[in-house]
Image (cartoon, grey):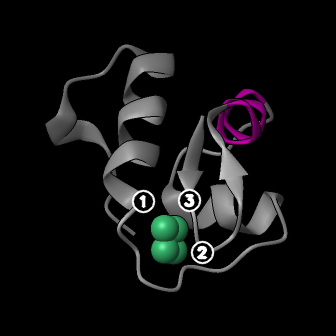
Amino acid sequence: MYICLCNGLTDRDVKSAVASGANRCANVYELLGAAPQCAKCTVHIRDIIRESADLPATQIIRK
Ligand code: FES
């Protein structure tokens, strides 16, 4: 499923970046060679980061 339409990133791409150590949206974009454009995808990226770390939403760094 596409998470980021601007960069053509899928949930698998984002999960792969998170598994490689990305713990912020900026890290995810960087590891995937992408850059935020409209930033509508950040909420979904944060969800994937939170799910992978099993953290409450308030502990995700919003950069
Ligand atoms: S949907 Fe990801 S930057 Fe626009």
User: Which kind of residue does numbered mark 3 sit on?
Assistant: Cys
Question: Does the beta carbon at disc 3 come under 8 Å from ligand 1?
Answer: yes
Q: Is mark 2 in CB contact (under 8 Å) with mark 1?
A: yes
Question: Element under label 2?
Answer: loop
User: Which kind of residue does numbered mark 1 sit on?
Assistant: Cys
Please state, as top left, top right, bottom left or bottom right, where the C terminus lies in the image.
Answer: bottom left
Q: Which residues are magenta?
A: 12-19
Q: Position of residue 46 (x, y in %)?
A: 38, 44
Mark 3 Cα-neighbour bin, 10 Å: few <14, some 14–19, many ≥20: many
Question: Does the beta carbon at disc 1 come under 8 Å from ligand 1?
Answer: yes
Q: Nearer the viewer, residue 19 or 2?
A: 2
Q: Nearer the viewer, mark 2 or mark 1?
A: 2
Residue at position x 51%, y 59% in the image? 25
Q: CA distance from mark 3 to mark 1?
A: 5 Å
Q: Is mark 3 in CB contact (under 8 Å) with mark 1?
A: yes
Question: Element under label 1?
Answer: loop
Q: In the rendered view, does 44 fall on the left or right side of 17?
A: left
| Label 2 vs 1, first from the N-terminus | 2
Question: Does the beta carbon at disc 2 come under 8 Å from ligand 1?
Answer: yes
Q: What residue did someone put label 2 on?
A: 6
Q: Quadrant of residue 30?
A: bottom right
Q: CA distance from mark 2 to mark 1?
A: 9 Å
Residue at position x 62%, y 35% in the image? 11
Residue 40 to residue 32: above or below: below
Q: How many marks?
A: 3
Q: What residue did someone put label 1 on?
A: 41
Please state, as top left, top right, bottom left or bottom right, where the N terminus lies in the image.
Answer: top right
Question: Element under label 3?
Answer: strand
Q: Is mark 2 in CB contact (under 8 Å) with mark 3?
A: yes
Residue at position x 80%, y 34% in the image? 20
Q: What residue did someone put label 3 on?
A: 4
Q: CA distance from mark 2 to mark 3?
A: 6 Å
